[in-house]
Image (cartoon, rainbow, N blue to C red):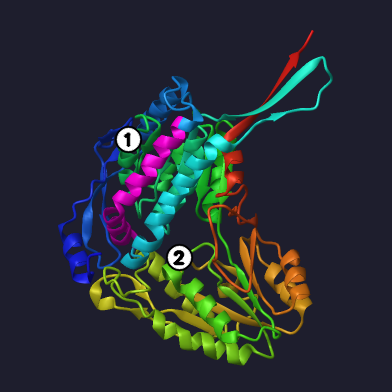
Amino acid sequence: MPQSNSWAARAADLRPDGRAVIDGQRVAAVDGQTFEKRSPIDNRLLGAVARGQAADVDAAVRAARAAFDDRRWAGKAPAVRKKILQRFADKILGAKEELALLETLDMGKPIQYSLSVDVPSTARCIAWYAEAVDKIYDEIAPTPDSALALITREAMGVIGAIVPWNYPMIMAAWKLGPALAAGNSVVLKPSEKSPYTACRLAELAVEAGIPPGVFNVVPGFGHEAGEALALHMDVDAIGFTGSTRVGRRMLDYAGRSNLKRVYNELGGKSAFLVFDDFKDLERAAKTVAGSMFFNQGESCNAPSRVLVHERVAEEFTALVAAEAPSYAPGNPLDTGTVLGALVDETQMRTVLGYIDAGSAEGARCVAGGQQALAQTGGYYVEPTVFAGVSNGMKIAREEIFGPVMSILTFKTEEEAIALANNSSYGLQASVWSDGLNRAHRVARALRAGTVHVNQYDEDDITVPFGGYKQSGNGRDKSLHAFDKYTELKTTWIRLD
């Protein structure tokens, strides 16, 4: 693996291609427009990216529809699609260092995690759905002797995928894996803040044997390319991951167009409940710090609301505050860095605004709270911990998407459950207790798509990911994701 100085040298030499990929070819925007893409590491110019708009989206959708209609992909046997997708996963691993560097430069995450988490997870997702596709069986309904009723799943057609900037490759793979394995064509709109790896993935897909037109990428802004894709009358479904605010728009766009299916994976304000019967507080503190500050806190499932029993709150708060300095921000191209840059200046200003709001509303900042490394020209914020937080405070209710943790206290199990559920979100939660009955009881009572017990973030592609309430609908990952990208058909045959 290249050392940090080598990564810096490679970054200096990199000239990423920001053109769209439509029908298997790199193309400029129809009107020739581009936008500048700068790295959050130090504000360096990475290059010009195609500014896709309605005409570009229309070209991509036409290519995707043609590919679906002539069955060049959907008509292949599942075992054949499997082999091609497995080659795609191998291609991703083969381009590991290139993709990792693009991801780090694009959105600021530490290179060590781009290498050890993002690229392998992307490849595993594609490979897992490849393996699954020829092992899923349809159904025969119970009927009288005079009939045969078949229940089959069919590919929907053209899937629009709109993904965020925090895990650009992984979020794309969560859509691409099941959608492509099922036989659909895809038009992917990456965030304008992190477009490069999506475009490169589309090239690798063609190299692996996925036919041109099956997987297209149109970079651009949400209000232009994203809106055009969501409003397009020939898109059958939208898989969206992003903010709850934009998720509402996705539903509106579906209503204004062809009532396409919309699957939203949205925000979170996940609760991390620590009871006084849990003895290893140090492990709990290390876990919550590691999970909260991973990816600079830019994770929808970050455990940003930490609810601690009042009897152990002081000790626990001290343990978490002591962990914060080990997550000091650093240059993401340094292989020792564990907390990198926020994605851009706007996000940094938003996070600092929340920190100011926490102090103004009476919370006590016990760690961090400041911008860091301003001299680099990049966008860094110290890992920040607030104590004395009440559930009505802005920092306890709104998704911050930065390295900011709020610690609240409770007296009883009932109060802890009520506090945890008193949120418009319901993505994930965690229960820390040495009592088997309490762990089961509280986990069952929490309104969240995933509940961790005595751990956080242990995970796999084999289990679904998604939330309750305003955290979205549908599920990414696992076999359940196939439900989002297939239609159920009943074929009733009369037997004479």
The image shows residue 62, relative to residue 465, as above or below, that is: above
Query: Residue, x 75% and y 19% (percent of image)?
Result: 148
Query: Residue, x 66% and y 66% (percent of image)?
Result: 423
Element type at mark 2? loop
The three-letter code of the residue at mark 2 reads Glu
The residue tagged 2 is 298
Q: Residues within 10 Å of mark 2 (few under 14, many from 20)?
A: many
**Residue 208 x %, y %:** 33, 37
Residue 206's tag is 1
Decide whether residue 404 is among the magenta residues: no
| Front-lying residue, 252 or 18 | 18
Q: Quadrant of residue 245?
A: bottom right
| Front-lying residue, 379 or 475 | 475
Magenta extent: 80-107
The three-letter code of the residue at mark 1 reads Val
Q: Is residue 484 visible?
A: yes
